[in-house]
Image: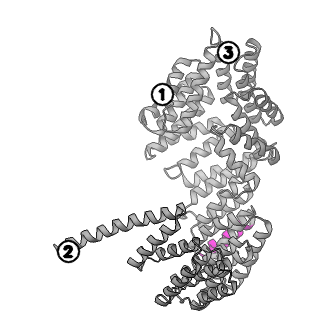
Amino acid sequence: MKYLLCILFSFSFLVLQAQDTRLAYKYLRDGEYRKASVIFKKMYEKDKTKNVFFSQYIKSLLELEEFEEAESEIEKELKSRPDDVTLYVSLGNLQERMMAPDKAEKSYRKAIKYVQPKHNDVINLGNTFVRSGKLDLALETYHQGTAKLNNDVIFAYYTADLYRRKGEIPDMIKHYLNYASDNVGKVRSLKKTFQTNLHTAEDLQELKKQLYERINNDPENKSYPEVLQWVFIHEKDYAKAFRQARAIDKKQDENGTRIMDLGNIAFNAADYPIAIKAFSYVVEEKGRTGSYYIEAKKSVMDSKIAQVKAVPDYNKNDFDSLRLEYKAFIDEVGVNNATAAIVKDYCEFLALDVNDIDAAVKTLEDMVEIRSIRKNERANAKISLADYYLIQGDIWEATLLYSQVDKEFREEFLGEVARYKNALLFYYSGNFGWAQEIFDILKSSTSKLISNDAIDKSVFITTNMGLDSTDTALRLFSGADLLAVQNRFPEAFQKLDSVKLLFPEHELEDDILHREALMYTALQKYDDAIKKYEIIIEKFPEDITCDNAIFELAQLYDLILKDPDSALPLYEKVFIDYSNSTFAVEARKRYRILRGDNVQ
């Protein structure tokens, strides 16, 4: 019974204390400092462990300008709590209010002098100085704590943060590097801090200078090379970043993850020579037993193909040596579950870059017959095979394969992909009603990309079917779409010209311009493509094709013509004027990369 009464009493006390606390803070907020001081004093006298109540009591007295009473209360506390040096800070703040700066300075000095060489005590005093706006005294506190404990790391983060607030970059860098010196795991957060606070080339030069000195003096430290690699990436000097990453990889006998990451960064920045070096290093140095052998080889080929395409006037003959290299690798590793993705890429390369559809079809036909291939890999191969059947003009075989995948993966992503492609087949053949029925079902797809494309196609059919009494214009246009997919560009242009001739001022005008721009780009007639895109942007700013045109034109300038000055305002226009566009996120990312931000 006594035990139960104690519990009830304790609970009641806590409830009353909470009520008093809320009331006291309300008085403080409302400027009723006398009432606040009375409650805070009463609560502190009941529970001497709650130093915050004493602090708020003193704050209330200061607001009332009852300085002598506040001074008396602080001095009494100092006698009962001589180890709590934050009381000297409170006394110093009071003395400053009393226009006694010399006394205040002595109080602050006592706080620093008498602080115990204990981690929490030093941090508590440092934070107290910071809350009082006395950053230099907080720095002194941490420097003294560092000296007393003979540990450069223990308060390094707090010290660095104070130098950051003061804008003293060299000292900020020094202490942040001290902070990370004993644990490479801290480097990740340090990179974010440096990215936020180092704004000029001079700042980065200072960081590099300090890093070089530290690496020279402490060559076994793992943190400093990590930060140096980040600096090179931040400066977009991927060649030096690769050399640094390679040195770390070799010294620490890593598995190639670091090099793969760097290769991907270089690839995304269109620095294909360094991407090729990075991925090739993993292939050659880690060998066939390495974790990334097939992925790295795939990335080597992706990078080499992208490097060829990055030259505006490249031709198909430039792919001859790559075809031999690709074929040799496929022969080396064979066709199996582990290599299915790279075999699929190889077939895409054959079909779309080399224009050897027959070789692509034969390779995929052989692959889908291999019994050991997992059903997902086989389904992906079937979808690609159907795409190439479509290019060859074998519509029946294409729809048969799409339907097989749709049936086998009815409620899964692969099934939706196959269903969407089947709907496109109906669209190409002029069966718009059946195509639209499938597109409408796919509007609720779990894949945002498929859902958006299905919505666009459904709206497109609805819009252009209701404009005249026949669907002739739409049939001609969809037929041109099919010819373009089959790389029969002269015939596709002729069909589009027929639409323009037979149906002048038709709603399809902006769509025709868009298809023409895409085909001119595929044909490497970039000046003609640019003209078509510019007409869309100027004449049809409200139409659904406009954000496509702006983004695709930006990519043409950015990735093919290497003209970032022309690409930048176009990317910006996409994510500002067309913020709901499916291209807005990628446009913002490319904009930041071209502007010089560190985007990984």
At 63% across and 8% down in the image, what residue appears? 469
The reply to whether the C-beta atoms of the residues labelled 1 and 2 are less than 8 Å apart is no
Q: Nearer the viewer, mark 1 or mark 2?
A: 2
Q: Quadrant of residue 245?
A: bottom right
Q: Is residue 570 within the magenta segment? A: no
Depth check, front residue: 80 or 467:
80
364 sits to left or right of 482: left
At 74% across and 76% down in the image, what residue appears? 170
Considering the numbered disc 3 on the image, is that residue within a helix, a strand or a loop? Answer: helix
The amino acid beneath tag 2 is Tyr
**What residue did someone put label 1 on?**
441
Relative to 316, is 142 above or below? below
Image position, residue 485 (x, y; %): 66, 30
Residues in magenta, as a range: 240-253
Image position, residue 468 (x, y; %): 65, 10
At 69% across and 54% down in the image, what residue appears? 267
Relative to 191, is 493 above or below? above
343 sits to left or right of 524: left
The amino acid beneath tag 1 is Ile
Depth check, front residue: 59 or 329:
59
Relative to 192, is 297 above or below? above
**What residue did someone put label 3 on?**
473
Q: Which mark is residue 3?
A: 2
Considering the numbered disc 2 on the image, is that residue within a helix, a strand or a loop? Answer: helix
